[in-house]
Structures are given as C-alpha cells and as structure tokens.
Image: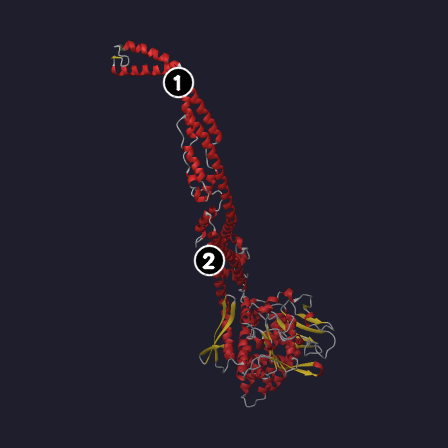
Amino acid sequence: MEPQLAAAVRQRLADAGLDEATVQLVTAACTGTPLDRSADATWPDDSEPDQRDDGDVAGVFLAGIAVEGFRGIGPRRELPLTPGPGLTLVVGRNGSGKSSFAEALEMCLTGTSSRWAGRPKAWQETWRNLHHDGDAAITTRLVGVGDAPCDLIHRWPDGENDVTAGHSELDDGRRLRDLGWAAALNQFRPLLSFNELGGMFDGRPADLYDAIAAILGVDPLRGAVEVLRQSRLADSKPIKAVTDARKELISQLRASHDDRADDVLTAIDGKDWDLPAALAAVQEDTTAPTSDLSRLRALIGIDAPHPSDAAQVAEQLRDAAAAHAAAAATDAGRADRIAQLLRQAIACVDHDGPTPCPLCGSGTVLDDDWRSTAEAEAERLADQARVVRDAEAAMSVARQQARRLMPSLPATLEDASLVGVNAVEALAAWQRLLDAPEDPGALARHLVDAVDALDEQLRELRAAASRELDRRQDDWRPLAVAVTRWVEDAREARLAEARAIQAQTAEKWLAACATEIEAERFAPIREAVRSYWERLRLESNVSLEDVSLYRAGQRRSLELDVTVDETGANALGVMSQGELHSLALAVFLPRATLDESPFRFVVLDDPVQAMDPARVEGLATVLAEVAKTRQVVVMTHDTRLPDAVRQLQIPATVWEVHRRPRSEIDLRTVDDPVDRYLDDARAVARTEELPAPVRAKLVAQMGRGALEALTVDRIRRRWLGRGIPHSEVERRLDGKRVHDLIALALFDSDDRDATTKVTPTLAGWFDGYADVLKDCKRGTHVGERVIEDAVFVRHLDGLVKKLRQEAPA
C-alpha cells in the first residue's frame, strides 16, 4: 500500500471512534497481517506520505516509431516525433498506413492490438505485410528511460506467422517487465485506438469502473475489504451450520423419554443457549435424586440385610434365650429374686423409716439393725444372681442385632414403579421382615426366613433395574454424544460469530473509507471529464451534469448523469455516435494524463470519426491544451482536424502519409511550427497593404517565433534524453529570451560566457544572421529593424537551416 494511502486510512481510523479490536482488524487487513494475529498488526514506519512532488516524476516521450513488414507498411519506414510536449498530426487517406504506426506502437508496448481483440482469429492472421519478405520489426525510440534515448524493439523472424510469438526488449536487453510498466500500461494506458474509442461504453459497466478505479490507487483497500469479507463469510458459516443442526437435535431430544433430554431442551430450545447447562445435562454422573437414573442406580445399590448376617443374629438369639432360661431355673435365679426383694424392702425403710414387715406379719420391725443385716444378705445373694443378669444382657444385645436387620421400608423401593421396575414382591418381602414376633426363638426363625426371601426378591429387583438402566443408557448415549459434539461446535461457532461481527464492523468501515478516498482522488478526473466534455460538446444539447463512480457490493459502474435540454436521461441512450466518441475521449484523456503515469505521450488513432465540424474544433482546443504538458500524436484521415488546427493557429507538426505500390510509405512534413512561422513571415513581408512599422514588427515577431520554436525543440529533446524530468525542463525554459535559447541550443549553457559567444558565432557563419537576431529582439518591441522585410526573411530562412545543422538535439 502506497504511503499516501496508508496515511489517509490511519488518519481516518484515528478519528473514527472504533473500538480497539476493530482498529486492529483494519490494520491487519491493510498491512497483510493474518487476521488471527491482528493484535500484533502495526503500520509500517514509512506509512507517512512522502513529500514527493508528482510534477517531478520523470516521464517517457516518443522520439520515433519505425515499422517494417507489419500491417500496411512494407519496407522499413520511420515516423519521426519530437520528444516533448506538443501536438503532432499524422494525416493520410484510409489505407495509407498511418494507423499502422499506431498499431505498431501498441504491439510494441503491450504485445497485442485492440484491432483484433474479441474478434475471430482471422483478424490476427493478416498482421504481416503482404508485400514484404524477411523479418518484421517495430522499433520505438524512447526518451526518458535512461540517460540517453533508447530503442524498444519487437521483432519476428522471417517465416514466423504467430503475432504473439514475438516480444519487445530494449536495445540493452531489458524487457518491459524490467521497467515496471505492466501495471502502468493498464492504469494509464496512453493509447486510444478507434476500436477502443467506439467500444468504450460497449462492455460491462464494471469494466470502465475498474479501469478508472485502478488508477486511483485504492485497490489495496478493496483487497483489504475483501480479506475482511472472506473472513466474515468463513466465520458466519459455522453459526448457520450449528443453527441448522440444532433443529434436528431438538427433534431428537423431544422424541427421547430420558430426563436429560428435557434438561438439554431447557438449555438450548430458545434464542439464548446455555451451553454449560446443556453439557452438564448429558454427563454420565448425573446424581439428581429425582432423576430416573438416580432412582435406577439406587435400586441397583439398595441396602438390605444379608442372609449370612441374619443366620448369625438368629444363632445369637437362640443362644441368649437358652442361657437365660437355664440361669432362671437355678438357685442363682432364686437368689436374684430374693436380692431384688430385699433391695425393695431396704428402699421402703430408707423412704418410710422403721416399719413392721409387710410380708410375714410376724411383727418383726424393719429398722436400722435389720437394714444392715439385709444389705449384707442382698450383696451375698446378688453375687449368686450375676449369671442371670449376664444372660439377660446377652438377650438384649441379640434383640438389638435383630432390630438392625429389620430397617424401615426405603423410599427407593416405593418409587421403583416410577422408573418401570416391578417391586411388588420385594415390597411384600420387606414388609414381612418388619412384622417380627417378640419371642426370641420365633424371632430367630422369622429373621432367617424373611431375610432369605427378601434377598431373593431384591436380587431379581436389582437385575431388573440394571437392565432398565442399561437400556436407557444405550438409548441415550448416541444422543448424548450428539449433544456433546453440538455443544462443542456451538462454542466454536459463537466464537466465530463474534469474530464475524467484528470483521463485519471493520469491513463496513473500511469499505466506506475506500469509497471516500476513491471519491476524493476521482474528483480531479471528474472535473477534467466535465471540462473536456464542455469543449467537445459544441452545439450539442446534451449536458454532462455529473460523473461518479458507483459501487454497491459487487455491482460497480461509471455513472454518467446527463440532461437533454434540462431533462435527465441515460447518456448511452440519448447520445449520438459522435457525442459518444467525444464523451469517450473526455473520459480517456484525464486518465491517460495523470501525473502518476510514467508516460508523457498520448497516441490517438482516428478520434474524429462521427464528429460534426463544430465538435472537431472543440477537439482541436482540447488537444492543444493536453499538448501543453504531453506529447500528443493523432492519426486521422479526416482533413477537418488539421484544418481546425490551422484555423485556430494551434502549434502542431503535421506529417502526411502516402502509400505507394507494394506498401512503400512516404512521409513528408506539411505543417511544422518553425516552417509555419517562416511561411507567415514571408506572407506578411509581401503584404504591402500593411503599414511599414506594423509589417516590420509582425515579421520580427514571426522570426523570433521561428527561432524560439526551433531552439526549444532542440533543447527539450536534449534534456529529456538525459532523463531530466519534464517539469524541470519547463522550469528551466520558462522566461528564457531568444538570445538565451540560442546559447543553450548551441553551447548547452546560458551563462555569460555562452550568451556572449552567440552574436560572434552567428556573424562567423554570416553577418546577416547576427542582424536577424538583433532585428528579432529589437523589432518585436519598437517595430524598427536593420534589414528590410524581404532580406530579413531570406536571412532568417538561412539562419534556421544553419541552426538545424549546428544545434544537435
């Protein structure tokens, strides 16, 4: 991207108020940084516009075109051209060979010809001249490529009939690609053939837009916009694919009877997707107590007494019951009962004090003495009864163990029907276990029988729950995999969608920026087109109101807004062929004469056709204006253009082309600026009706004009050939007097020593030449001269001839 364009974008970017991410995306697109590394994108250090003056661009001029064996030219013939600004007309009847010079130049520069573009192959097969044997060649002499004039040569060996087989190269071996002209020949094409002139508006609207837009230098921005667009389109595809896949996934989830399907639907069946919730819903370790999976897993892992534990506890019950019965039947049992009775009597004494014995009725008083004796007896009897107490403790422990093997009915078992598992028998078995008798022996038998029956029912229950769990998992697993993959894709798609939205913001801004810069750069061309049209439209009722570049997406065109007698219309629909040619020329010239172009010449082949006389005069004025800064070469068979140039007194060199038998071409100058001044001087000198002072002044002016035209031509050729930019040449020539110009032409200097030698040098050739110079300087101001008119003209003619010999180009 050129520095000026980069600086214009950076300035607008700084003032746009965009977020940093968008700024970095624009920067990346414009600098060629991959968009996924946009955070690292930076503008190059040289992105500030340079201060180059476009007017100082060195330019290339034509010094001559030589053609041999090509098209209408047989033996080699050269069209001499003056390298520098000015107008040259090449005239001749149709078929004289003049257009062959233009086509040869086009072939030499571009490798093809618009003559046969888009036409059948037969148009290419007659490119060789029918009357010439041997090699065919085109030589274009260029000034401004290097320090000295050089030749660009396109040659075909004898027998080669394929016009595309040749190529052009400079006399030093370099090819056009080495000069870097490929892009410039497309952007600033300096050639306009009659076919191109007539067909400029025949192609697609986008073609003319592209041709003009290319020279504005905004294509890098359009390329950056395309990078952003392609990125946006690529990042927009995943979210569409995910959205489409979601529809099918939702249908599958709704058809599923798995609880997790409902959870996933809740997460994704809406505008906002809860991707973490959707992913959590499909995890294999779902433990929500109300979920079917949890119920099934609970059934599989239900905790119940084991038959071995029941057998062990039953054995403990039987042993404890037997031990307790045996102890109760012994003296230990009687002693324990008496010890308990004595402790109760002692408790009565402790509570009520001495009291008659309530049992024996003997009148014995239970007092403190009795109490001491009774305590001692109770301790003795308690020791005897410990065996009974131990048996009772063992019985209590055994009953507690039995109760532990009879847990309450679990809710999991009661909810089995909710998950499609039949638990009726298991529930009944569990309930029978809970209906236990009190008798230890009966309890022991009940425990073993009930636990064995429950264990059998629970084994069947667990197997059924396991089968149901496996079935549900098998049904869910493919859907879970699909959900998991969709969630992963959705996450990536959302990231891509965010990138697409960011890229779209950057794309829209950069496209608008490119259009704005394009409009700014097109403005001078737009004004030039309108200006040229105003001069070319003489006596036309079609007014060109505006010219603009239109772009909307992929649609683009050059819009030409015209009015016919103040009524709006489509230009291509209302213009005559001559008006269309004039409009095409008005569009072509601004593009071909931009300062950025390396070509300082414009070659037009037959632009006059279909133009009426008034418009030809307008064309002459336009060409004269362009010729002030460009070398303009026009081929035409129409005598109206050279007539208009003469009538308007426009400086021009006119070459006349004649074709003799067997394609031999003759060239002769019929109108040269220097010769024209000489002819005018002769005519005025013979006009006796003019007052002598007026005639003397006019003849002197004509003489000075001839000397200035000759010397300026020589100096321009020399300096441009050295590679001095055209603007510098014009700057050096600006304001030079005729004396200084002769010094520059003869001595390549206008310092004091050089200018001092001018008069002696002319006098050395012939005394009258020095007098001619003196009269040219003095006579144009006061109308007085040393030499009379007729002699002055004769000596002037001799001086011009001598200068042409002595002042090399």
**Residue 640 falls in image quadrant:** bottom right
Viewer-nearest residue: 276 or 65 = 276
Q: Is residue 334 above or below residue 120?
A: above
3D distance between C-alphas at marks 1 and 2? 107 Å
Residue linked to disc 1: 328
**Which residue type carries mark 1?**
Ala
Q: Is residue 570 left or right of residue 749?
A: left
Relative image position of residue 316 (x, y in whole percent) = 45, 24
**Which residue type carries mark 2?**
Ala
What SS does tag 2 mark? helix
Residue 771 seen in render = no
Relative image position of residue 318 (x, y in whole percent) = 44, 24
* Label of residue 200 in the image: none
Viewer-nearest residue: 265 or 189 = 265
Q: Residues within 10 Å of mark 1 (few under 14, many from 20)?
A: many
Q: Residues within 10 Å of mark 2 (few under 14, many from 20)?
A: few
What SS does tag 1 mark? helix
Q: Earlier in the sequence, mark 1 or mark 2?
A: 2
**Residue 86 falls in image quadrant:** bottom right
Quadrant, the N terminus? bottom right
Residue linked to disc 2: 14
Q: How is the image coloured?
A: secondary structure
Q: Is residue 554 left or right of residue 331?
A: right
Q: Is residue 663 above or below residue 291?
A: below
Residue 531 seen in render = yes
Viewer-nearest residue: 375 or 26 = 375
Viewer-nearest residue: 746 or 733 = 733
